[in-house]
Amino acid sequence: DQQVKQNSPSLSVQEGRISILNCDYTNSMFDYFLWYKKYPAEGPTFLISISSIKDKNEDGRFTVFLNKSAKHLSLHIVPSQPGDSAVYFCAASANNDMRFGAGTRLTVKP
Amino acid sequence: DAGVIQSPRHEVTEMGQEVTLRCKPISGHNSLFWYRQTMMRGLELLIYFNNNVPIDDSGMPEDRFSAKMPNASFSTLKIQPSEPRDSAVYFCASSPLGGIGYNEQFFGPGTRLTVL
């Protein structure tokens, strides 16, 4: 069963605009959430995280929003840059469990 | 630090052969994780070690898969015998803290396995 879902396999945005990547989870025990970015032929790299005690965490151009009641989180990238083109994985974790979504491929067009 | 090192980067083998994937975690990291990435299922956790001890191997698909961590700087994932459905990218990751939750993981570049 997929406890973490990224329902959009791909997303294309124009440079300078906002990119919004979405992620849904089903297990209410998850209380820590992470986003990873992956370039081709490389491993995923950590981008940003959020604890369930918060509803927003910001780091430069990247902001993660958490809606616990909806079991939904999103990653906003503003402004989007061509170098942001990559696959983005969301992950949800509890004390001894971590699940990843299938990823969303973001393409930022110049 | 060179980061997490995996070898080989690419492996092509025939069905029925034994495959061994290798991983060197970042020095000083206490946890090591093996993942498999496929188009259909995304990133799946196979097994993780804490201080060289296997903690959770519930993600290992079947008995054909085994993993070892004989010391803090080396781990192997073995598939014997291999099957075409094992074709995937296998990632190793390490983390400075124990446990799997709440910690950023540092991933290696992956091994792309093709079983013919």
Image (tube, coloured by chain):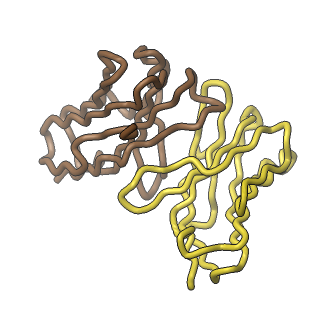
Question: At which x and y percent is residue B85?
Answer: 29, 49
For the residue pair B109 and B90, the one nearer the viewer reads as: B109
Measuring 41% from the left and 31% from the top, which residue is drawn there?
Answer: B26
The quadrant of the image that shows the N terminus of chain B is top left
Whole-percent x, y for residue A26 in the image:
72, 44
Q: Which quadrant of the view contains residue A102?
A: bottom right
Please state which of residues A87 and A57 is positioned toward the viewer in this rendering. A57
Residue A84, by quadrant, is bottom right
Q: Colour of chain B?
A: brown
Q: Is residue A41 above or below residue B97?
A: below
Q: In this view, does A56 lie to the left or right of A97?
A: right
Residue beneath the point at 53% across and 27% down: B96
Mark count: 0
Where residue B84 sits: x, y (%)?
23, 50
Kindly give the residue lying farthest to the front in the view shown. B1
Left or right: where B80 falls relative to B91: left
Q: In this view, does A67 lie to the left or right of B8?
A: right
Q: Residue at x 29, y 45 (%)?
A: B86
- Output the letter for the chain in yellow: A
Q: Nearer the viewer, residue B62 or B115?
A: B115
Q: Out of B1 and A76, give the one closest to the viewer.
A: B1
Above-or-below relation of B38 to A86 = above
